[in-house]
Image (cartoon, rainbow, N blue to C red):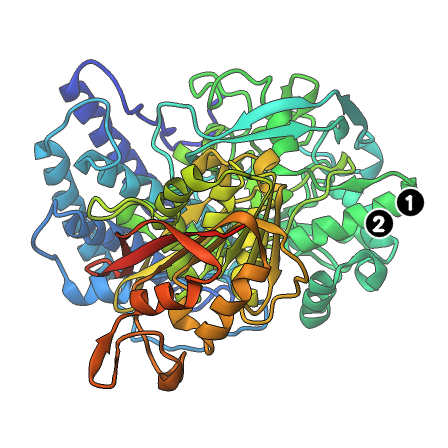
Amino acid sequence: MKTTTLTPAFTPSLSGGDPEQKRRELLDYFHTTWHTYEQLFTCLTEEQAWTTKAIPLRHPLIFYYAHTATFFINKLIAGGYLTERIDERMEAMMAIGVDEMSWDDLNDDHYAWPTPAAVQDYRDRVRQQVIEVITHLPLTLPIGWNDPAWAILMGIEHERIHLETSSVLIRQLPISWVTPQPAWPICPHFSSSRQDVPDNTLVPQSGGTLTLGKQDDYYGWDNEYGQQVQTIAPFAASKMLVSHAEFYEFVGDGGYQTAEWWDEEGWGWRSYTQADKPTFWVGDIASPDQLKLRVLAEEIDFPWDWPVEVNQLEASAFCRWKSAKSGRPIQLPSEGEWAWLREPIDGDHPDWHTPIGNINLQGWASSCPVTYFAQGDFFDIVGNVWQWTTTPISGYQGFTVHPLYDDFSTPTFDGKHNLIKGGSWISTGNEALKAARYAFRRHFFQHAGFRYVESTHQETMLKNPYETDTMVAQYLDFQYGENRFCVENYAKALVEKVIPHCHSTLHALDLGCATGRASFELSRYFDRVTGIDYSARFIDVALQLMTGEDFRYALPTEGELVDYHQVRLSDLAITAEQWQKIDFKQGDACNLKVTHAEYDLIFASNLIDRLREPTRFLKSLSALLKPGGVLMLSSPYTWLEVFTPKENWLGGIRENGEAVTTYQTLQRLLRDDFEEIQPAEDIPFVIRETARKHQYTVAQASYWRRRA
């Protein structure tokens, strides 16, 4: 079935046996994408359609017409594949789009936009430049993450994203500013009667285990890579997408006027916008027979059997209403539940040569009936409209930012952007792949509807997934980050050095544990570990790591630029059985609430030169250790008055004109209750400040055994 006059997008794979054939495929994919994008903008027939915002939170369409072209040049220059710009002003002005912020966060900026003719001239020059790059770039197969061809595919797929988002903006312009075009035909099939739309039903699913993460041989965005194993509990899913007719039951029952069906965010949006029906419905809901539907560039008779298109807040409100009416736990599916429904459909993408759904521009330039495309036991698992989920987007285990587009995914890992799955009629290229992962703020409009599930799954809503506090991020990197300059992990090295001296491994105390790495390492050997730090923020991080989830942090590279990292204990081969032995607490090392000798090891790393009263601390240790227990002290002896009054320094001073080192004072203070196990030794460590600035420090470690 081919109804549009546009050429479908047959996405090239990354591999193959003939590089020159692959080069021809890249050129064809680029030409098709470029032509299709420009064809979309032929729907604009009034000058103000180019330069007036369709919605306050987005730029006008003239920006997006230029933006996708500037993206090619900016990324090719960033990758070192081009050295000269085409139009520096255009490539700066049109470089960065607008995130769809809060619904009331109005963007009133005004710009001196170029004319459509000027942008078209710029696009023509970019087109020739990209063709030149593709024709002459070095090409080996398979195409890899760091190859120039990857940057070309990035530009192509980026334009295909904006093909879809721009079509939504066109749909939100005044109808008098746009005109239907033959290349974008509307589906002629629809039911004009609500009564003729079949009832939706729930289809039971057994559930099981599946692995999420990209496995196909096509270009992907960074958030698609990595893996996540999920166990899906039994659930039931609606056979069809929710139609206009089914959603009208909610509207007609006062759904938009009843606060109990909405969460706080949703009711805030509804109250601000005064919405009383889906945004693409035209007319008075009190006269349903008079309703029209706004499609791409026209208003049509109301198709009651097409899928409703709403934002996530509206879809969730419908589900709460339906749950109350039915007495069943109705909600939107999670990413995993949608993936379970998608699994039986053959292939990593729809069969593009024989389409199985309204997708990839092989159907119409609109939705179609929710019963038109059967896919196994369901309709429209793939295509027609995107499907909202309950799942906020985040990276899978192993997520890595692509250096050419470091802000593609990470700004959305904030708990405020929910995944949409399945694709719509205009989803092409990467968007049509099984592995595709796109997310939008919950109040945002896309060609998106929903299906519902009967499920007890509860989604975790991350609120601050990327730690940006400088000290916390720096400590996370110090304790869990990669080894730098051939210096092994400091906490791990110290634990491995002290363990051979421990005769008993019942209970260890990690004082000044910070974000907990040494405590986790000690849990490999000890039956119990107590980790104590003065900083509640550090303890919170350690406790969050114990959930088994990723902890992400951002480190400065230079100036305001950052790069992104993640920690997961399983990546360090630290198991739940081990970390469950640990008790993390906030506490003061000089005022520990211990009344008897409890520990077989006291591990105090980089602590004593950060205490106000280090002598008092050292004097208290014999009461905490069991006879024969081990004390490990390490420190670079960086005495600073901001932490320790000078009169309390253990070393780095002169007494009676003689130099006194910290190690000498340790020997004097500890000799009555401890014997030194071995001579002190130097242990280096590295702390990253920026990409090109690191602290290289040498600490001294000493080992002591409490006398019997």
Q: Quadrant of residue 189?
A: top right
Q: Residues within 10 Å of mark 2 (few under 14, many from 20)?
A: many
**Three-letter residue code for mark 1:** Lys
- Is residue 694 rendered to the left or right of residue 333? left
Q: Position of residue 184 (x, y in %)?
A: 46, 40
Q: Which residue is mark 2?
A: 321
Q: Quick check: can you spot residue 182?
A: no
Residue 630 or residue 525, whichever sits in front: 630
Extreme-top residue of the structure: 17
Compute the Cα span from label 2 to label 1.
6 Å
Residue ID at (65%, 51%): 312
Q: Quick check: can you spot residue 691?
A: yes
Q: Which residue is mark 1?
A: 325
- Is residue 94 rendered to the left or right of residue 439? left
Residue ID at (68%, 31%): 370
Pointers 2 and 1 in contact (C-beta within 8 Å): yes
